Image (spheres, coloured by chain):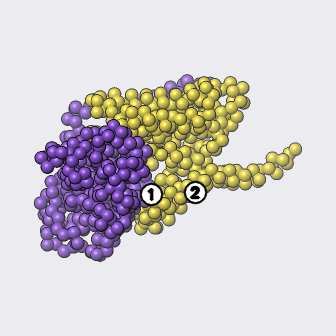
Amino acid sequence: MNTSKTLIRTFVTLTSAAALLTGCGKTTKSDTGGGAPSASASAATNSAAPSASVAVANPSAPLAKDLKITFLPKKVNIPYFSVCETGAQKAAASLGEQLKATGPSDASASSQVTYINTAAQQGQNALLIAANDSNAVAPALKAARARGMKVVAFDSDAATDARDVFINQAATEDIGVGQVKLISDAIKGTGEIAILSATANATNQNAWIAVMKKELAKPEYANVKLVDIAYGDDDDQISFQKTQGLLQAHPKLKGIISPTTIGVAAAARYLDSSEYKGKVAVTGVGTPNQLRKFVKNGTMASFALWDPANLGYLATYAAVALSSGQITGKPGEKFKAGDLGEYTIGANGEVVLGPPIVFTKENIDKYDF
Amino acid sequence: MKAKDFLRWETALFVLLVLIGVVGAARTGGGFLAGQNLFYLGLDIGEIAIMALPLTLVIVAAEIDLSVASVLGLSSALIGALWNAGWALETILPLVLLVGAVCGAFNGVLVTRMGLPSLAVTIGTLALYRGLALIVLGDHAVADFPATYTRFGTTPLPGTPIPYPIALFGVLAVVFGLLLHATAFGRAVFALGANEEAARFSGIRVKRNKEILFVLSGVLSALAGIVYTFRFSSARADNGTGLELAVVAAVLLGGVSIFGGRGTIGGVILAVLVLGALRNVLILADTSTEVLTVVTGLLLLASVLAPAIIQGILNRFKRPIEGAPS
């Protein structure tokens, strides 16, 4: 047997392939200055074409008809994104555009890339995308933009230099301030509260919590005391147990804020089934269908969320305004978004949908998602 | 050339590929055959193609390796973590390949020295290596890789629609084709798959050869991890989750017998192209994701059934001839 020889030969080939891949010299993070220069360099080569060739925004340009728009959610068959899509379809229909939804069956970092490439290949005029990974989709989006496609990120942003605008569902400030107001109202301005978050390193959760802490320091919340922050890891079972733990650890607890759809549902379910029902208040960020029961049976008074249909609606209007040349994505430009009124593009090409909706017993039946 | 030589599974795959090309081009107004689209198609199949090569040998030897996509994820997570720690890519990449080899060797040792079935072992390490990836990098994503590296996954070879990963795959395919079909090692792999006892008695070092196969699978999965990371310029622990099924599907559709002892590298290459082209055409033609999943599932079933059925038909033709002299 000359297995060893074969093995050696194979390894030599593999190592040379690796050498070919790695090239010569030394490349470290610090060499490239933390990657920032290389990122901006690639941005310059890739996004120069669209931003440079589009001259200036012409706010009075007529809206283009029959545009081909692709709607690309994080993955297909998620109720939240289906509601976004109905809003997008409504906007497209009223403007006379063709909008089609497509997408991967899993929400992994890279699964959207094939669909971005396909949209570019099909000559779609615009793409609405909720990015699974802001950087993984960036090269494909840049290539698509270089071929003339407008890119509107919504719900979850793509790398800033890979899209034209980002439709943000709600400003961080609005969510944080709103949650504190809701819990304070529910406990009549006095008592201990706790936060049940998702994971300890969830970016948006932590940003909201930071705002909440700042807000709680204000004089009007002098009697509301934040005593604990628990993490339910966006897992129903863990969130359920953490709620139980919070109530046992803090016998005087009056309220829980859970700014995550999974956490708030688990907390409401626990309270509903326990002796604390009606005594401890809960609020958070959730969907009406998930929390309807608890609002109706008095477990919780109110909670907040943006309207996903309006998010899709606004994203479509932004895409059409971009494709028609009314806006180019620069801060300060304005565009009209049908029933929602006029919007102005903010810093980093962000457009904020508006303050979140507060759902209560009175209005919850108007929403189905 | 006898008629029988044309009645090969590879011929059927080739015809299927041409058919997909023709129908695809017609359905998408030529868009399928555009250079840019072929480039994207090449990129999409790159990692699957690279991992399918050693897995072909593993399955021919009547074993299986389901941990390939987890090794891909682990190597991606390692690249991200070490890059964040300030290591040079020239050190990181060979190290990642080495870690891939260790992962493969661990699979191999459990299978050969402990006598455990590779299906059970690699289902275990599928979870183990993915878990290690999560420990190494958590749920962060590292993205700030230099453009000199990421361009390998975003630009074609100058003047062609061929992506760099496919060029790399081409070189590796020749190496593995020769290894399986033109060396004593390759003959040993077939012997192992056909009848392990007979192979042992004819002097083939069964354990050693199997370990080599698992190491090769580990190394090339790590290589696929490098390709994946630079293609998306995103190092993440969950990269390539579920990809092992696509790789196994490609190998089985390529006519490699799941029971070992039969298969060709050429068939697997054709199968990778068929699966990639079909997916590309279906998505270009706006087929829904649900239909896409069903079609992939049916193809997987067909890939296991068809070679068996065809072999059955061939045997039917052969039997009277074999029986004649006696």
**x then y, percent, for residue A269:** 40, 51
Q: Which chain is purple?
A: A
Q: Which residue is mark 1?
A: B280
Q: Which residue is mark 2?
A: B298
- Residue at figure coordinates x 42%, y 51% from the top left: A273
Q: Secondary structure at mark 2?
A: helix
Q: Is residue B203 left or right of residue A43?
A: right
**x then y, percent, for residue A199:** 33, 42
Q: Colour of chain B?
A: yellow
- Residue at figure coordinates x 33%, y 33% from the top left: B81
Q: Secondary structure at mark 1?
A: helix
Q: Which mark is residue B79?
A: none
- Name the quadrant of the C terminus of chain B: top right
| Closer to us: A360 or B280 | A360
- Chain for numbered disc 2: B
CB within 8 Å, label 1 to label 2: no
Give the farthest residue toward the right. B326
Give the answer, above or below, for where A22 lies relative to A334.
Answer: above
**x then y, percent, for residue A22:** 34, 33
Tally the marks: 2
Q: How would you rate the neighbour count of disc 1 (Cα within 10 Å): few for under 14, some for 14-19, many for 20 or more?
A: many
Using the numbered discs, state the Cα–Cα distance from disc 1 to disc 2 in whole angstroms: 17 Å
- Chain for numbered disc 1: B
- Residue at figure coordinates x 69%, y 53% from the top left: B309
Determine the image quadrant of residue B115: top right
| Closer to us: A184 or A82 | A184
Q: Which is nearer the N-term, disc 1 or disc 2?
A: 1
- Residue at figure coordinates x 57%, y 28% from the top left: B110
Mark 2: amino acid: Leu
Specify whether residue A250 is in view. Answer: yes
